[in-house]
Amino acid sequence: MIVEEVKGQPESTAAAQAARPGLKQKTLRGGAITVVSQGIRFTIYTLSTVVMARLLSPADFGLVGMVTAVTGFLSVFKDAGLSVATIQRDVVTREQVSTLFWINTAVGLALAAVCLVAAPLLASFYREPRLLTITAALATPFVLGGLGAQHQALLRRELRFKALAVVDIAGVTAGFAAGVAVALAGLGYWAAVGMPVGTALAETICLWVMMPWRPGLPKRRCGIRSMLKFGGLMSAVSALNYLFRNVDKVLIGRYWGAAPLGIYQKAYGLLMLPISQVNAPISGVAITALSRVQNEPERMRRYFLGGYEIAASLILPIICAMTIFADEVVIFMLGRQWSSAVDVFRLLAPATLIGALLNPFGWLFISTGRPDRQFKLACMWTTLIIASFGVGLRYGVNGVASAYSAMSCVLAFPVLWYAIQGTLVRMKDVLGSIWRPAVAAAAVAPFAWLLKLSLAVSLPIGVRATLGCGFVFAGYAFLLLVVFGRWRIYFDLWQTIRGQR
């Protein structure tokens, strides 16, 4: 909510907003809408993955991946962390948001210029002249992202998750359509370029339509200095996170070439696809809700633990199913020409699981206004993860994946301990939230392996993948909801969403 200032004082505060009894219901409804929209988005994105994997070769994806691994690093600065600052702030004025809009726009233009300057350097680094035009084309989303950053932040701040759902679905649909059209035109790797450009254009147009706010002129001394500091730290954290998620791809592309990079990148992307559909929507809703109760520590603790249990409950069965039935999932989704990605897929699973389970602790750093602590943690994590890539690189893509997972396992508990310092959340609270989902996933895993071994090879690969994953989800749901009795909690949540509580 943007507030006007009257005689120098804001007319409402976030504390007053938080005190209203409808916050929990709005948050849960927003979460439900976001999860449903992410489900639709996931379906479209999955379809695009299946289609594009058959229209393009691993070398095509690897070629574009050489660019996106680097230009993607620039994208973490596209809103300079200012959209999160707008969401987290107790009170924000129109003058502040307008000024942030113009800063975002300037940052987007600057990043596009950097991208253009970097194009010949990338082409030289990879010894691939085609990267020159690919890099230039991928400068477009930077400008579009800057134009829509504050509109998106305002929609989140106002808990307008239906509008955000429309934006997400429209973006991924437009990107898919653009990619397929370019691929069918016989332009090869340009299809992988057209997808992000089409998505960014559609999202920006939708954001301006859904959010009627229009920026005014920027103003000096409007109280954005603290927001710029907050945004700067958030950008630094995002940059470090991007580094550890992409340095492996840069190294593989440089030392092993486009085809191995394409295999690694597709395995990693396919594994992260369902996880991102869980973490992204829950994180968006959780950060907004926790920011509204940042001055009520006990209420924040309850909200966080409830959200963390939901996130863990969704993530664990996904990783379990995809790891056990990796052969079926990879070949069904990508085709048999990608069968060499199966081993990489399994080796990356532990790192993906740990990263997904630690991700929610970022909610605490952001909502309590402590990005400085998150930055220190990101420095340590990124340094050690990148060091592990260097150790595993000599053994190829499997070596990099193994080293990544091993280092993630070593860092898991130290990171968890650090993240909860200075909050009311305790280690026993975290373990109390996660032990039931963990035990349920561990218990269903041996039976899933037996099912995998017993499924007839003559069955279509899609049938085996569906049966296997369906068995894991059904068995896990039975153990968690019935045996451990968690059905009541989710039933109460459903009642609250429907407005009956």
Image (cartoon, rainbow, N blue to C red):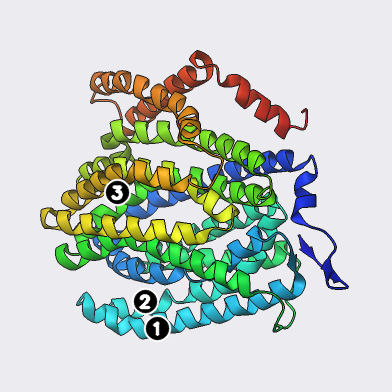
Pointer 2 with pointer 1, Cβ within 8 A: yes
Residue under label 3, please give it. Answer: 267
Pinpoint residue 491: horizontal percent, then vertical percent: 65, 24
* Residue furthest to the right: 7
Residue under label 1, please give it. Answer: 116
Pinpoint residue 480: horizontal percent, then vertical percent: 49, 21
Element under disc 3: helix
* Residue furthest to the front: 422
Work out whether residue 9 or residue 185 is closer to the camera in this orientation and state it: 9
C-alpha distance separating marks 2 and 1: 7 Å
C-alpha distance separating marks 3 and 1: 29 Å
* Residue 412, quarter of the rendered image: top left
The amino acid on which the numbered mark 1 sits, given as a three-letter code, is Leu
Label 2 vs 1, first from the N-terminus: 1
Q: Is residue 384 above or below residue 122?
A: above
Work out whether residue 61 or residue 160 is closer to the camera in this orientation and state it: 160
Residue under label 2, please give it. Answer: 135
369 displayed left or right of 390: right
